[in-house]
Image: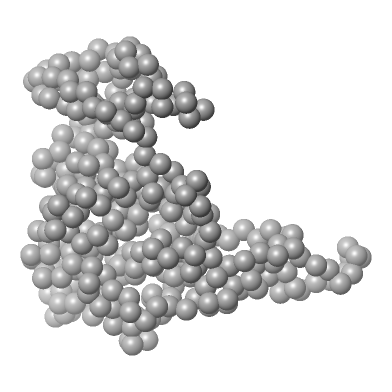
């Protein structure tokens, strides 16, 4: 959940104008350390100017509705002023969006849905209290329903390309069901059953007209804020050079159709260690691969010398 605490350095003044943040050395009118100061002497912050043409997947947001605008404002404030988290998201996006974007495009799913993955997991292989896992936060049952292998030995919810395909299949199914990408996104968070229930009780068919639970009620607005901030970082005061961003390591693939007794030894064959092998293949959940069925798996290996050169 994108909830943040802003740390204020005592030696800096943060000046925010129209969403731009800058810092200058703090000054003092007195060298007396006992002189009482107002917090305002060292800290300046203003509201964020919300763009007037927000849309999700090409579907317009009814910003003239004051209640809708207030909900948008909340997510812009939370996600802009949690600067450390926003910077990390920008760094990770450069590494993982190139994997996600072509899969969305191939499936006819709007590019905006890459920001749904950001909202779900912060682009990390995390596990929710309910047991949803991976970048796309897929439940075990859903993963198996859509063709992923999910067990203690192999869990393809952690395979970014495969999980992105499952997300596409799920979203397209619910876009067909509801006729709206916005409601498809909401159903990704709450489940189609919950959305159907809310729509039936409230006799409404538009996300922005529905009274939803707090999490789903914030969901699309959070995605909108993340989309805007990550698409226009300078506008919101973030200054990152290309050298600051995380990059995808160049890799090649190895196909196997038999068991692997020891991945530590397997990794050494490619001049890497166990940790690096697992970082590139987080869907391999144990130090070995059972594979009694002779299934074909594709393992990603970083190019020779990449990590030793990068050190």
Q: Quadrant of residue 295?
A: top left
Instruction: Give left or right: position of 282 versus 78.
Output: left
Marker count (numbered): 0
Q: Position of residue 87 (x, y in %)?
A: 49, 54
Q: Position of residue 199 (x, y in %)?
A: 15, 74
Q: Quadrant of residue 211?
A: bottom left
Q: Quick check: 271 above or below 82? A: above
Q: Which quadrant, please, contains the N terminus? A: bottom left
Residue 272 image point, x, y percent:
38, 19
Residue lying at 27% horizontally and 45% vertically, measured from the top left: 99
Which residue sits at x=44%, y=70%? 76
Residue extending farthest to the right is 32
Q: Nearer the viewer, residue 11 or 68?
A: 11
Residue 10 in the figure: left or right of residue 220: right
Q: Residue at x 50, y 46 (%)?
A: 243
Q: In the displayed structure, does residue 273 sit left or right of residue 259?
A: right
Q: Residue at x 38, y 26 (%)?
A: 276
Q: Is 20 drawn above or below residue 280 in the view shown?
A: below
Q: Is residue 104 above or below residue 161?
A: below
Residue 129, can we see it?
no
- Specify whether residue 17 is in view: yes
Q: Nearer the viewer, residue 44 or 201?
A: 44
């Amino acid at each position: 959940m994108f909830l943040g605490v802003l740390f204020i350095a005592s030696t800096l003044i943060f000046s925010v104008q129209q969403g731009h943040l800058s810092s200058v050395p703090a000054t003092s009118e007195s060298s007396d350390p006992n002189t009482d100061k107002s917090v305002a002497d060292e800290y300046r912050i203003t509201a964020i100017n919300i763009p007037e043409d927000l849309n999700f997947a090409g579907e317009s947001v009814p910003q003239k509705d004051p209640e809708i605008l207030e909900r948008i404002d909340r997510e812009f404030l939370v996600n802009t002023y949690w600067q450390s988290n926003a910077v990390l998201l920008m760094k990770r996006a450069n590494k993982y969006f190139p994997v996600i974007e072509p899969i969305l495009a191939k499936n006819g799913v709007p590019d905006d849905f890459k920001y749904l993955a950001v909202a779900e997991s912060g682009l990390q292989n995390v596990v929710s209290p309910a047991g949803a896992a991976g970048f796309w936060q897929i439940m075990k049952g859903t993963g198996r329903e859509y063709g992923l292998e999910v067990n203690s030995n192999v869990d393809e919810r952690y395979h970014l390309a495969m999980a992105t395909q499952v997300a596409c299949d799920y979203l397209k199914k619910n876009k067909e069901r509801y006729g709206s990408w916005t409601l498809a996104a909401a159903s990704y968070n709450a489940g189609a059953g919950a959305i159907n229930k809310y729509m039936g009780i409230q006799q409404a068919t538009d996300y922005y007209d529905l009274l939803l639970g707090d999490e789903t009620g914030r969901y699309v607005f959070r995605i909108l804020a993340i989309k805007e901030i990550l698409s226009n970082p300078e506008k919101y005061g973030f200054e990152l050079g290309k050298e600051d961003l995380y990059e995808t390591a160049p890799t090649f693939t190895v196909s196997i159709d038999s068991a692997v007794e020891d991945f530590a030894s397997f990794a050494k064959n490619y001049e890497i260690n166990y940790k690096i092998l697992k970082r590139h293949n987080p869907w391999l959940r144990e130090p070995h691969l059972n594979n009694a069925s002779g299934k074909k798996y594709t393992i990603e290996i970083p190019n020779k010398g990449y990590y030793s050169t990068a050190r």
